[in-house]
Amino acid sequence: MNEIRERILQLQPDLIALRHDLHAHPELGFEEHRTAAIVAEWLQKHDIETLTGVAGTGIAGTLRGEAGEGAVVGFRADMDALPIEEQNDLPYRSRHVGTMHACGHDGHTTILLGAAAVLAQLRAQLRGTVRFYFQPAEEVVSGAQAMLTEGVLQQMRPRWVVALHGRPGLPLGSIGLRAGVMMASADTFDIWLQGKGGHAALPHLAEDPIVASAQLVFALQTLTSRESDPSDPFVLSVTQLHAGNTYNVLPQQAHLAGTVRCLCEETRSRVRRRIEQLVDAVAQAGRLNGRFEWHAGVPALRNDEAVVARIAQVAEESFGSERVIWLKHPLMGAEDFAYFAQEVPAAMFYLGLGEVADWHNACFDFADGAIAPGVEMLVRLALSELCT
Ligand SMILES: [Zn+2]
Ligand SMILES: [Zn+2]
């Protein structure tokens, strides 16, 4: 126990410096060239086999234990930043205008590199293999799938994969857990209502997509208020409504767009079907043509129960049960680690960041105090499978 903590403590100044460097040089999805170079250099420095250029800027590291054959386990970190102008006044404030690490992926990358370094020091004790997946483009929910398409799980099938995400508001260094659904699916849609338009003073001769759009927005909201099982909530938000460009013309077309967040596949397909029906019904009532397009996004993230139980046990042994927080509800946000969880037993846990600004806020900054407990969790998880 103390030996591992000692190793992490020795590494801590380097890890904090690394995190600050990544924070100062944020890169958007699929543009993480500098970050990927730093990750690759670090892994190679610790004699970890490093495959670069996976799905563009992704990296897969392989650490082979020297104590014999055993399972493969995997860890995933995301590396990308967000198109937000940082408002923090920090010595390591973002040097890239309009881009910042406002979701803590600088912290996630640092923690996984820290775990890789410690596990590399312990390789003589490891029976099996640890895989490290550094994925690009989580914020645009496409990096995970791109890496999976390149076969990172097939190359060496892991028994389980774990990821962590820093969470503002949870006590610093605590572990937030939930078995089953952890985060929602995220799909988007476009709707067009089309008619012949006409003179604003002669509405009886025209077909009006604006009034129909207003009806449709309300009708869509009744899906969440009247058709959703309160124990299986979903979110439907209309986020765009465009129609017309002057005062005296009823336009020919209105365009609506939005997003749907669900916690299970059945609800996801039911909501999609119901939106389509409402578009048809409202269009028909308004003598308009309705067109509906659904863009399937990331599925809900479902944490494997056995993997969650392992994380809970490791966290309790390492930090005490009072540091383990069981989350009552899933979050309606989405996370593309869900694609890993569709392929292999997987779970994500939250790492408490204490009182920092919220995710995607221009004042967010990952808590350096969470790095050591994060590294310790990943190291001990690997040891729990490979060092028995
Ligand atoms: Zn984010
Ligand atoms: Zn994130």
Image (cartoon, rainbow, N blue to C red):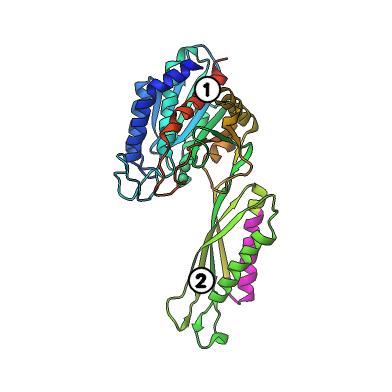
Above-or-below relation of 68 to 150: above
Judging by the rendered image, the residue that carries numbered circle 1 is 380
In the image, what residue occupies the spot 55% across and 17% down? 70
In this rendering, does residue 344 appear at all? no
Between 58 and 121, the one nearer to me in the picture: 121
Region in magenta: 270-289
Disc 2 residue crowd, few under 14, some 14–19, many 20+, Cα 10 Å: many
Above-or-below relation of 283 to 73: below
Q: Earlier in the sequence, mark 1 or mark 2?
A: 2
Name the spot of residue 218 as percent of width and height, x first. Answer: 61, 68
In this rendering, does residue 62 appear at all? yes
Amino acid type of the residue that numbered disc 1 sits on in the rendered structure: Arg
Between 277 and 301, the one nearer to me in the picture: 301
At mark 1, the secondary structure is: helix
- The residue at the far bottom in this view is 201
At mark 2, the secondary structure is: strand
Looking at the rendered image, the disc whose residue lies closer to the viewer, 1 or 2, is 1
In the image, the residue with mark 2 has its CB under 8 Å from the nearest atom of ligand 1:
no
Disc 1 residue crowd, few under 14, some 14–19, many 20+, Cα 10 Å: many
Based on the picture, tell me whether residue 132 belongs to the magenta stretch.
Answer: no
Above-or-below relation of 90 to 234: above
Judging by the rendered image, the residue that carries numbered circle 2 is 254
In the image, what residue occupies the spot 43% across and 36% down? 367
- How many angstroms separate mark 1 from mark 2 (CA)? 55 Å
Amino acid type of the residue that numbered disc 2 sits on in the rendered structure: Ala
